[in-house]
């Protein structure tokens, strides 16, 4: 006589980081479902590793201590051998971005806070890498893009919109900024963008994301 397990199947609610959600919206067709399935598996396994952490720390140190890139120059020698090619590739663009900030004496790091956005039925974690405060009063909340390919237009729009939407929590009165580190290119909100349209588009994408997330759980629950 077989015994049925009484252990409930764990329910993992739909969830995405801002990076995951914006990567999702830039995909098309079946690639969307495949991507969501991969995110769910990562969440189930609680896996994931950020290979860029040391580079972010070095960039922040160069800003904070006004060292003109010396931390970025040194970080390549500090990471494991497997990451040295990646860091060597990223360093040039990171230094170009650092130089674009202007006089180091006129810019300081600012503390940012993460926020949880509700996009349609989906919870999305909004997490900039750091904030900047300029002597003239300007503030920026900065998110870094490290991928080999430049960020898709959809990803740029979604990320900047989501940060702007929650800026009161992240860094009040700041402008959202996305930096394409490999190319040293800075992206800002398009003044001609229509927030209501973007909001409607993202809500639809989030609804589809949630449906795909639930669909990937169906075999495990069967």
Image (cartoon, rainbow, N blue to C red):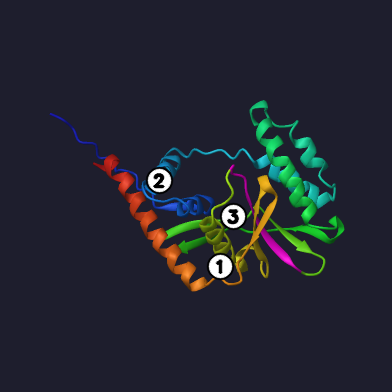
Q: Quadrant of residue 175?
A: bottom right
How far from the left and from the top, in percent, is residue 209?
Answer: 39, 54
Q: Earlier in the sequence, mark 2 or mark 3?
A: 2
Q: Which secondary structure class fits the magenta region best?
A: strand
List the residue tagged with mark 2. Answer: 31
Query: Which numbered marker is on residue 21?
Result: none
Q: Residues within 10 Å of mark 2 (few under 14, many from 20)?
A: few
Q: Does residue 205 show up magenta in the picture?
A: no
Q: Is residue 200 rendered to the left or right of residue 219?
A: right
Q: Is residue 65 left or right of residue 20?
A: right
Secondary-structure class at tag 1: helix
Find residue 3 and report its horizontal and vertical position in percent.
18, 33
Residue at point 68% right, 67% down? 174
Which residue in the protein does label 1 denote? 165
User: Circle 3 sits on which residue?
Assistant: 127
Instruction: Say few, some or many: other residues with alpha carbon within 10 Å of mark 3 (under 14 / 14 to 19 / 20 or more).
Output: some
């Amino acid at each position: 006589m077989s015994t049925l397990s009484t252990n409930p199947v764990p329910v993992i609610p739909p969830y995405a980081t801002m990076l995951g959600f914006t990567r999702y919206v830039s995909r098309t067709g079946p690639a969307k479902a495949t991507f969501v399935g991969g995110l769910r598996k990562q969440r189930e396994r609680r896996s994931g590793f950020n290979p860029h952490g040391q580079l972010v720390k070095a960039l922040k140190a160069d800003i904070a201590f006004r060292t003109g890139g010396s931390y970025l120059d040194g970080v390549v020698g500090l990471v494991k051998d497997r990451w040295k090619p990646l860091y060597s590739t990223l360093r040039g663009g990171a230094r170009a971005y650092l130089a674009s900030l202007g006089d180091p004496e006129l810019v300081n790091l600012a503390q940012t806070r993460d926020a949880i956005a509700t996009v349609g039925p989906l919870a999305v974690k909004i997490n900039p890498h750091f904030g900047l405060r300029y002597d003239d009063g300007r503030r920026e909340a900065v998110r870094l893009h490290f991928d080999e390919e430049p960020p898709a237009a959809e990803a740029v729009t979604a990320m900047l919109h989501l940060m702007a939407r929650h800026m009161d929590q992240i860094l009040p009165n700041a402008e959202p900024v996305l930096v394409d580190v490999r190319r040293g290119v800075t992206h800002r909100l398009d003044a001609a963008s229509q927030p209501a349209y973007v909001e409607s588009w993202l809500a639809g994408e989030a609804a589809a994301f949630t449906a795909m997330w639930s669909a990937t759980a169906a075999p495990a629950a069967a």
